[in-house]
Amino acid sequence: MNNSDYKILLVDDEPDILEFVSYNLKKEGYQVFTAKNGREAIFNAVEINPHLIILDVMMPEMDGMETCVELKKIAQLENTIIVFLTARGEDYSQLAGFEAGADDYISKPIKPGLLISRVKALLKRYSGQPTESTGLLTAGSITIDKERYVIIKDGREIVLPKKEFELLTLLVNKPNKVFSREEIFAKVWGNNVVVGDRTIDVHVRKLREKIGVECIKTVKGVGYKFDA
């Protein structure tokens, strides 16, 4: 896909931020839409079905966390990437953001070059793009359907957020191999993405809640493995 094929919804209650980010994204050829608050964001998202939503956290009426939770409930937006753009304290915002279902996190203030680099990296993850290998991946009681982007466990289909799906796919692809935290960060989030130390822990905990605690084992001081 070309940049002009991607639709990005930018949500922020500060006009200066909307103007600054919109200008830089449009300069790269992206289709950019804006919203000034969470309620407007939900309405616009349903109308335009964006590939990426860049969402501020601190907004009146409905903040970014609440907005993200509501967006995640909309079936037509299941492939939409949601990333927070915020100046709030890193630990709180990242953990709360991932709990709300966000795929990533960008800190304010941000330089135009870094913004564009992060957006390009995020859009590469868009699940509408073909994966390098398609079909079914099975280990133990888990089957990953890469073409449909769903998990099957005990005959039950489970839809996961993108980062959880990619993390589980990485582990399942090589059962019993111990992946270091650094390796997981590099392969799931990318070397250009800076996230908090507890990011992996949050995603693993949420995966365990959905697929069972027995599947993913912690190797203390090293990382994680999928126990087939």
Image (cartoon, rainbow, N blue to C red):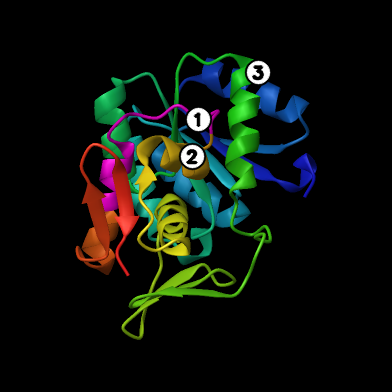
Query: Which residue is disc 2 drawn over?
Result: 189
Marks 1 and 2: CB-CB under 8 Å? yes
Would you name the residue on which mark 1 appears?
193
Query: Looking at the image, do the residues carrying marks 3 and 1 touch, with CB atoms under 8 Å apart?
Result: no
Rounded to the nearest angstrom, the CA distance separating label 3 from label 1 is 14 Å
Circle nearer the viewer, 3 or 1: 1
Mark 1 residue crowding within 10 angstroms, few (<14) / some (14–19) / many (20+): some
Determine the CA span between mark 1 and mark 2. 6 Å
Is mark 3 in CB contact (under 8 Å) with mark 2?
A: no
Q: Secondary structure at mark 2?
A: helix
The residue range painted magenta reads: 191-204
Residue 162, image x and y in percent?
Answer: 47, 54
* Three-letter residue code for mark 2: Trp
In the rendered image, residue 56 lying in the magenta stretch gets the answer no
Q: Which mark is residue 214?
A: none
The dot on residue 113 is 3
Q: Position of residue 191 (x, y in %)?
A: 53, 31
Mark 3 or mark 1: which comes first in sequence? 3
Pick out the residue farthest to the bottom. Answer: 155
Q: Nearer the viewer, mark 3 or mark 2?
A: 2
Q: Is residue 48 left or right of residue 92?
A: right
Q: Dot 3 lies on which element?
A: helix
Was residue 193 drawn as part of the magenta stretch in this picture?
A: yes
Task: Please say if 142 is above or below 180.
Answer: below
Q: Quadrant of the C terminus?
A: bottom left
The answer to whether residue 33 is seen in the rendering is no
Residue pictured at 34% horizontal, 27% vertical: 58
Other residues around mark 3 within 10 Å, as few (<14) / some (14–19) / many (≥20):
few
The reply, left or right, for residue 48 in relation to residue 145 is right
